[in-house]
Amino acid sequence: MEIKACIFDLDGVIVDTAKYHFVAWREIARELGFEFTEEHNERLKGVSRMRSLEILLEVGGITLDQQTKERLAERKNKDYLSYILQMTPDEILPRAKDFLLELRQHNVKIALGSASKNAMVILNRLQIAHLFDAVIDGTKVTKAKPDPEIFLKGAEELHIPPENCVVFEDAEAGIEAAIAAKMKCVGIGSRKILGKANLVIPGFVDFSFQKLNELK
Ligand code: BG6
Ligand code: MG
């Protein structure tokens, strides 16, 4: 199998935005009268904005009508945006940018496959948007991971067959989506959660194009 393209999740793979999602959601929970912990926040990783709110409401044991939910999701996003608009390029996770540059040197195409509707804002803040040949974000898909839609669209925009693509993901649903797309996948994080991936690494430090090729 020749590796012709790599498709990257954003949150938790290239940048740690979970902490900003957390403080914004925690504020909503406080207003609703309950505590939302970092442990609860784990459940929101890789999950869409509205589904995140539904999980939060489940934690608080609260039921709300659709209109109120939409208002709260919008408010949370305003808060979240105020944090991410302050982000700087030094928040890119260690060696992630070097790895992207190394892939480009080897003529490997690069796509983003993120559920976030704020992905472009983040890539621009990190000053790495130009390194991506295609960006598939939450504004371009209708089905959330573990559905393979997001990664298949990435491969399609790059004009590379799925079997020549490798996905980088930190969420279990993302690994499942990659498998469903018939792509190889590298989990970023712990083997306990990402065990279904072809390879699990803690991050891009000590990782290289050469090590990626061992996946073949
Ligand atoms: C994912 C994050 O990448 O994007 C989730 O892991 C988040 O936590 C989702 O809920 C949607 O993000 P946004 O920016 O559209 O609210
Ligand atoms: Mg992620």
Image: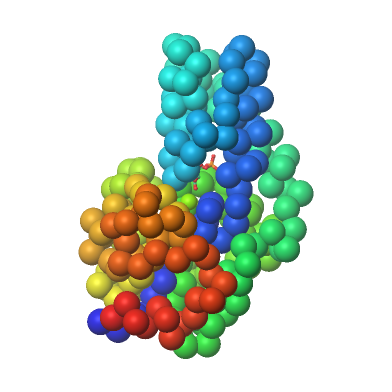
The answer to whether 107 appears left or right of 81 in the picture is left
| Image vertical order of residue 23 relative to residue 214, above or below | above
Can residue 77 be seen from the camera position used here?
no
Rendered residue at 43%/20% (across/down): 58
Residue 85 placement (x, y as % from top left): 72, 48
| Image vertical order of residue 138 relative to residue 1, above or below | above
Rendered residue at 62%/62% (across/down): 93
Residue 4 placement (x, y as % from top left): 36, 80
Residue 20 placement (x, y as % from top left): 65, 41
Can residue 187 be seen from the camera position used here?
yes
The answer to whether 66 appears left or right of 30 in the picture is left
Residue 86 placement (x, y as % from top left): 76, 49
Please identify the quadrant where the N terminus is shown. bottom left
- Give the color scheme: rainbow, by chain, secondary structure or one colour: rainbow
For the residue pair 159 and 29, the one nearer the viewer reads as: 29
The answer to whether 106 appears left or right of 186 in the picture is right
Please identify the quadrant where the C terminus is shown. bottom left
How many numbered badges does the structure rendering display? 0
Based on the displayed image, in which of its 4 quarters is residue 30 positioned?
top right
Based on the displayed image, in which of its 4 quarters is residue 91 positioned?
bottom right
Based on the displayed image, in which of its 4 quarters is residue 36 positioned?
top right
Rendered residue at 60%/57% (across/down): 15
For the residue pair 153 and 108, the one nearer the viewer reads as: 108
Residue placed furthest toward the front: 192
The answer to whether 94 appears left or right of 190 in the picture is right
